[in-house]
Image (cartoon, grey):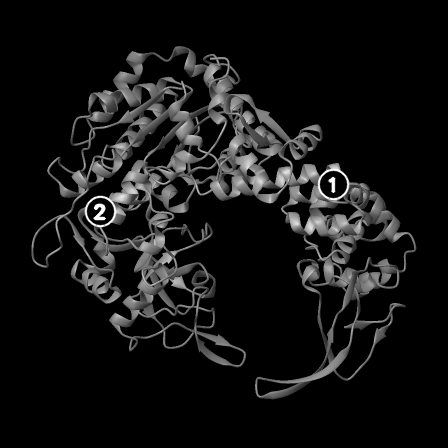
Amino acid sequence: MRIAADGSVIHVANSLSVSLPEACKDAAKVGSLWEVDGPTAQTTFTAGGYTIIEDHLEAHTARFVKPNTRLLETWLQRNVKGIGEVKAGRLARNPRLIEIIEERDISSLLEAGVPSRSIGPLLLEFPSDAYMAAINWLADHHLPVKLAETLSAVWREKTIAMLKENPFRLLNFDVPFELCCKIAKGLGFASDHPKYQAALAADLISQYCRATSSTLMLRPAFEKKCREMGVDFNVVLRHAMEQELIGYIRGEDGFQLEGEFLLEALTGQRLRDAILRPPGAGSSAADWECNLTVEAVKERLREFEQTIQFRLTDEQRRAVLLASSMNVFALSGGAGTGKTTILQAIVTVLERVSFGVDIFQVALSGRAAQRMVEATGRPASTIAKFCADMARKKQDQRPDHCIVVIDEASMVDLYSMHALLLHLPAATRFIFVGDVDQLPPVGGGLLFHNIMKSTFPAVELTEVKRQGAESGIHRFATAVRHQHGCIALPDYQEGVEIDCAVLRRVDPDEIGQLFQVHGGAERCAILTSMQAGEAGVGNLNMGMQRRLGFNRPVVRLVHEDGVYDYVNFTGSKFYLNDPILITKNDYDIGVRNGDLGTIVEIFDEQTEDGHLGCVKIGGRMFDLNADLLDKMSLGYAMTIHKAQGSQWENVILVLNRRATHMLDKTLLYTGATRAQKKLIVCSEDMGLVQQAVDRGSIALQRKTNLLQHLDADF
């Protein structure tokens, strides 16, 4: 619909399409009003066998328009549920309606005739003056206008004034430093301005932390970067500290941004408060702690041991006793040391001694959460879902005392932990379970590693139970974990029974043959450190598809102009019997990021309700539709990161020279320990293995300050 400046509808024969400037596209929602200017040209295209002629306007400028009384009728119909054409017309004739909306006067809105069910959406959608001003200011400066909602919520009517006073405030909202500089220059800020110099220092530290996943930057690294850029270290440092953008961390001789300092300080303080909390304090639901005895825990543990087929080791029993007795506890252990059994024991014992206090099991990834469900038989969720569920509850519906068990804790970053803490009561007990020698967080910080280093109660399991001492997989994994001298593996020979060997080639066809020989997707996994390249996930997956042939039924989607083979975000099609990997959580149907499955049926035609076939995931059957397809990738091969928390009988671990920058002992150890019965390392150069082992853990090179906060006042 085309609307003139006076609010009247322009009637023309052709429809009009408009291309908005890139910066405005995020704000161009259905029903939003825009004043645009630019050349119009007639275009022709074919759809459904018909030739369509339309006018197309390429907008050079676009201004977000607030609905005035003339445009209000159209805006109400398009944006507010429950308001149709007749009611919109009647409401728009009220000369005070906009004033009432802006005053958020609910009683007057009801009197004016706005349905009660429509008031919430109306107040939510109607743009404030601050939002309008922010959108158009950002668009004028070629910034993403999606920032407008956040900025106007923080600064309200002062938004534009705050940005003009210091455009480098946009750094806090992830606007690149170079773009902030461009805006600052337009506003008259010279490069030697104190605000410019301070922002430069903060940006240097921010870039370093993003690149290294650190939370602070040591003085020598900061000075070196300043020299490389030709800036005066002392000058930028002085301005940044005067404006309180960064702080000096005395114990580390480094500098930290305010945000990261607060996150580590608050996380450390919260965990210290938890461990120092007296028994029963903070909630009447915690009264059970006052009567808890070591003997009671031991009795419940003996009951648990009677339900399993083997005896726990002394270190495993000690772990259960500490986890059940302490307000904060951390458990680390390598693959096969029994962490899963201990997790089950801890949850079982705590349920009994606490008389049913809420125990929440969480993990960073969906697959890790599913593993907790399988291990304990109790619900578990991702940290993100747990936080979202808690946020939806009213305060009186949330527990004021609970126990939280965090699995695969080595992968939990500082930001995820902080988000979790925001949704937990003061009287929370924390149990962290992980492995300091497996993959570190993708995000910043070293939460679990620092907890294990701190004075907090912790146990590291050392005795491997899954594989015997004579297992080649165990010997190789142990040598990698402990960096034992020279690493050597026997050469792989077909037909020779060796549980751990090396194939000194990286040939996708040969890898595909090994995959089939060792049981296919049911019993084998191909793991690699790379997404791209000859030995990357994409190429290995496509190679396996080619090997199995393209004469199988393929998933096809119905579109308006025909039926097409479905192609996903990686460029892959899906054929019958292809293994698949879930890449996004879908809690509505019960699949999680990291779940593995197989396409077991593809229909000849798409059904009326959009079903295309069936996929089997974790022993359950699911309808295959467009929504699920968008959450799937091929699952013949996957990254080692995706595989953490899963295991297969046989694993083909592919190492490539192109991945040397990210190959370290944690990546190698994590990949190797996914194998239960057989591990084949594919590498043209065994020197890569030795290099990874000698390199140690890249994660331990991260610079953080959490340990100081954890051990403060102890």
> Closer to the observer: label 1 or label 2?
1
Residue 260, above or below 511: above
Relative horizontal placement of residue 250, taking residue 326 as reference (left or right): right
- Count of marks placed on residues: 2
In the rendered image, residue 211, in percent from the top left (x then y), is placed at 50, 44
Task: Decide which of tag 1 and tag 2 comes sooner along the chain.
Answer: 1
Residue 547 in which image quadrant: bottom left
Please determine whether, in this image, residue 292 is positioned above or below residue 648. above
- Which residue is at the front of the view, 535 or 522? 535
> What amino acid is labelled 2 in the image?
Ala
**Residue identified by numbered label 2:** 675
Label 1, on which residue?
192
Q: Residue at x 46, y 52 (%)?
A: 586
> Considering depth in this image, is 120 or 660 the residue closer to the camera?
660
Place of residue 712 in the rendered image (x, y in percent of width and height, measured from the top left): 50, 16
Question: What is the secondary structure assignment of the residue under circle 1?
Answer: loop
Q: Residue at x 36, y 17 (%)?
A: 325
Q: Residue most toward the right?
A: 95
Residue 706 visible in the snapshot: yes
49 w.r.t. 443: above or below: below
Whether residue 28 is visible here, answered yes or no, is: no
Q: CA distance from mark 1 to mark 2?
A: 58 Å
- Residue 389 location in percent, x, y? 53, 40
Q: Amino acid at mark 1?
A: Asp
Q: Secondary structure at mark 2?
A: strand
The N terminus lies in quadrant: bottom right
- Dividing the picture into quadrants, the one containing residue 695 is top left
Q: Residue 65 location in percent, x, y?
A: 81, 60
Q: Residues within 10 Å of mark 2 (few under 14, many from 20)?
A: many
